[in-house]
Image (spheres, grey):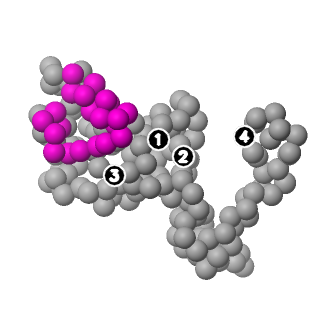
Amino acid sequence: IMFIKPGHLKALTQSITHESEKSFVFPMDWRQKMAGVMDGYITKEGLWDRLIFEGARSKVIGEGAGNLRGVVVSGEPPLDSDALTPARITLSVPFVNSRIHPVATAPIFASHPLDLQTFAPSSIAHVGPPVINAEVKLLEVNDAELGQGKDPVGKLVVRGPIVGKLL
């Protein structure tokens, strides 16, 4: 399992895509993999993956590319939703996007590895629900804006055994 920051994920995805584009069947392969992600599945065992992306991953990641079973991304700046689908296509493994904080010993929010939802472009990527053993509450929310259909904005408060105290 690879634990990386959003910037590293973008660089890794771009490098694998650049290596893959050297093949003349890359556009067809990309369309097939995109259709799979939009249908709700990812695989490293497909014909298209073996033809193009397996070799590209090996050139970029090295000999451990074949053993890669999952990716966990967390850190600042938050991951853009634009980066999710290309990362899922090029890496072809379950992908967890999480939100961390310096006073917590574990992620506060984490998406499910097989959650393949896509959201509006140029927005912050979905980080999933609160993790087990953490209580999360949004305070100081403007009810008038919620009534107009806007996204809730407020102060996030977290408590639980994973949260420390500032000294």
Does the rendering let one see residue 107?
yes
Residue that badge 3 annotates: 94
Residue that badge 2 annotates: 126
What's the amino acid at mark 1? Gln
Q: Label 1 to label 3, Cα distance in Å?
A: 13 Å
Q: Is residue 48 above or below residue 42?
A: above
Q: Label 2 to label 3, Cα distance in Å?
A: 15 Å
Image quadrant containing the N terminus? bottom left
Q: Are marks 1 and 3 in contact (CB under 8 Å)?
A: no
Q: Magenta region, mostly helix, strand or loop?
A: helix
- Tell me what residue is drawn at x 54 percent, y 51 percent: 127
- Secondary element under disc 3, as helix, strand or loop, is loop
What's the amino acid at mark 3? Pro
- Tell me what residue is drawn at x 38 percent, y 51 percent: 114
- Secondary element under disc 2, as helix, strand or loop, is loop
Q: Which mark is residue 151?
A: 4
Q: Which mark is residue 117?
A: 1
Image quadrant containing the C terminus? bottom right
